[in-house]
Image (cartoon, rainbow, N blue to C red):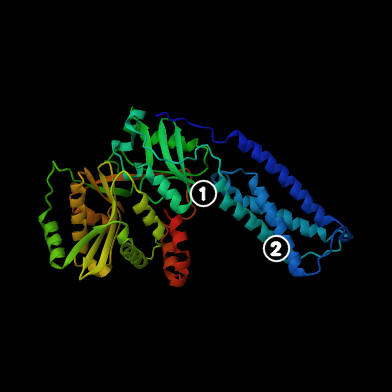
Amino acid sequence: MRLQFMNFYPAKSKMHSKISIFLLISFLIFILFLSFSPESGYPTISNPVTTHTAHFILFAGLGYIAALTFGTCPVRWYKTRFWLFLVLFTLAYWIEFLKSYIVFNNQAFSYKDVLANGTGIAIGIFFRIQTSSKNCHCAFSSSLTHPIGTKSGYHPIGGIELIGNNPCIPNIIGQTFHWKPVSIQKNGLVIRAICTGKEIVSLPHLSYGNIWIQKSTTVQSVEDRLSGYMDHSPFPSIELRYLSPDSSSGSSEKIITCKNVEHKNPIHFRSNLRRKINKAKNNGFYIESGGLELLDEFYKIYTAHLRTLGSASLSRKWFRELLTHYTGGFCGIFLLKKNRHTVGAALNLEYHGFYENCYVAVLKPFQQDYGSYALFEIMIQHARQLNCQIFSFGRSIKGSGVHQFKRQWDTFDIPLIWLRSDKLSINPRKHRWVLGIWKKVPYFIKKLVNHYIAKWIY
């Protein structure tokens, strides 16, 4: 398979920019003409509400057309939208201010008109942001339907194909959240990522991305190549996630905890762990497994657990898309039950012998009865039935309570590296006060914005 690096700004986008600039200048002249012409020169609007509406419509058009001049790539100009608004709002303010000094215009300065102008500008820019990605002509934009393959001269970082390396994942993410899959090749790297309209991420809502590197690359130069690409990337904001090829690296607090489940290595649980698994069975827990037909039960447990934690939950659509369109491996649900009631749930994915527990939740009252142990024991056995080599317990913070639970299963940790080209102004994962505010928001409000909030916390 031939991989080719393409120009970020195609020729037609330059023509599009010239047309947009012409439209902007023309529309601005039109607004100035209407603003400073004598009242007798155009129909008089006596209704103040209608006047404010006219101001809103005119400046909404100005905001939209001004945003057009930045091209169709939302990532390219996303961070400049505030400066664009400030420039246009200042212009609108001075237009209203100067109108009051023109004798033949006979119009008094009105803060309501200024407010209508500013609101229109903000709505115009916002609407452009929402529609720009749908019309994006970025040369990297693509539908990823095929694996890179071992003959391409590239291999995944660390040499292990993970869930994120499955070519169907970027498309599923794109379909669910209305984002665009992108494919980039540069500096001996192949990066399959998602354009969220704000930044490039490989991959959102997964702990790691789909990044391949030349086979001749040494472990020491992996991060150098990734950092080098980010320093010279055409994208102003990019985040790359990958598992460190050096498992001894202690620089990252995020880790993936894994267990070797190959058949050639018989599984022997330590006595204390075996005792907890047996207690769970004696307490009446049992497991039911399946696919899409179990989605409703899974989602009830998942959302109930996140409400307890005070976190936002992803939409049902995300899990339905996974269960419906995931190919190339196993995708299924496990339900933990007691007395015919579902008290825990998990959703697992498998790809090329790598089996990962992606989402798991056990209701708090049943955690003390060792329900989690019964659930994980069955999932590990299922990974062995599929002839997998590695079972992943998923991401956690090193030294946390969740990490301590995973260590009981005779596991090993792989450092998880997240590289960003810029720093988030507010990272809700690190700023506990953001979570504190969210917990105090009334539930009926949370329900309205829950999925939108969760969409952007990835």
Q: Quadrant of residue 262?
A: top left
Please, what is the three-letter code of the amino acid marked with disc 1?
Lys
Q: Is residue 98 above or below residue 12?
A: below
State the image coordinates of residue 353 (x, y, percent, origin top left).
25, 42
State the image coordinates of residue 398 (x, y, percent, origin top left).
29, 52
State the image coordinates of residue 329 (x, y, percent, origin top left).
29, 45
Callout 2 secondary element: helix
Residue under numbered circle 1: 198
Q: Could you classify mark 1 by the number of other residues whose Cα lies within 10 Å: few (under 14), some (14-19), or many (20 or more)?
A: many
Please, what is the three-letter code of the amino acid marked with disc 2?
Ala
Please tell me the numbered disc located at residue 116.
Answer: 2
The answer to whether the residues at label 1 and label 2 have Cβ atoms under 8 Å apart is no
Residue at image position (36%, 45%) is 208
N-term mark: 1 or 2: 2
Q: How many marks?
A: 2
Which one is in front, 407 or 130? 130
Residue at image position (14%, 57%) is 273
